Amino acid sequence: MSSGYRFIVDTMLGDLARWLRILGYDTVYSRIYSDREVLELAFLGGRVLVTRDGGLYRRAVKMGVKSVLVESTIIEERLAEVSVKLGIDLIVDPEKSRCPECNGVLERVEDKSLVKDRVPPNALNSYDIFYVCSKCGKAYWEGSHWHNIRRVIEEAKRRAEEYRKAYRPRKIKTRKGFGSSAFKDKNTPHNVGADTEASEQA
Ligand SMILES: [Zn+2]
């Protein structure tokens, strides 16, 4: 993770929400949010909106909410799109990952007695480092699923390289004086043109 972005992901992109958490990003996601709630949470919480809904995307941009419109349907390409449009690196570091289930912060645990009731015996014997979610208590370790995580990320990086060559940022006019400074977080880069559309002729 190399930026201070925090995200809110719309209800159609649950897989992407999990991956952003794995990449270490504080990511809000729920199937029950209405569009209005999503916009409010993005605006008030200083979160970047990630959406597949063009209408929602435009509403957000006009409010001054930084947004990414994701067009792909497969996860490797979705990650590539977000990476290129926001300029974020696709690097997984388990020390920085968040719980993909609930967005909780993971805590490194080396004392096996602390996780023995939530890790299967074979994993407990084979691994020395575990990560426990501070919110839901779920335990993680770099088991066989880890190869899949690495594979997806490597493929996403490859696609990001291709996507970067073809990508031309566009600009959308934001409503002047409305909102954009309201959530300038000191950790959030706000000079990235990202997915804002077309102002040349505006
Ligand atoms: Zn959790």
Image (tube, rainbow, N blue to C red):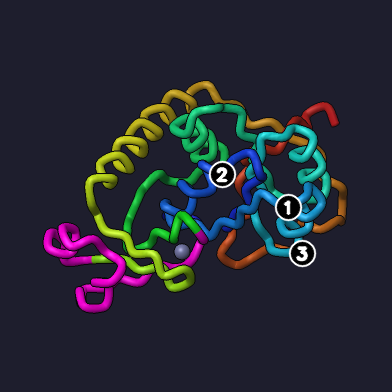
Indicate which label's residue lies in the foreground, 1 or 3: 1
Instruction: Quote the CA–CA distance across marks 1 and 3.
Output: 22 Å
Looking at the picture, how far across and down is residue 119, in whole percent? 26, 64
For label 1, the SS is loop
Q: Is residue 107 found inside the magenta-colored segment of the image? A: yes
Residue beneath disc 3: 182
Residue where numbered disc 2 is placed = 14
Q: Nearer the viewer, residue 171 or 95?
A: 95
Mark 1 and mark 2 in contact (Cβ < 8 Å)? no
Q: Earlier in the sequence, mark 2 or mark 3?
A: 2
Question: Callout 1, which amino acid?
Answer: Tyr
Mark with earlier residue (1, 3): 1
Question: Percent x, y for residue 101?
Answer: 48, 56
Residue where numbered disc 1 is placed: 33
The magenta stretch is: 102-129
Q: Nearer the viewer, residue 29 or 7?
A: 29
Q: Tell me how far mark 2 sits from mark 1, CA to CA.
A: 12 Å
The quadrant of the image that shows the C terminus is: top right
| Quadrant, the N terminus | bottom left
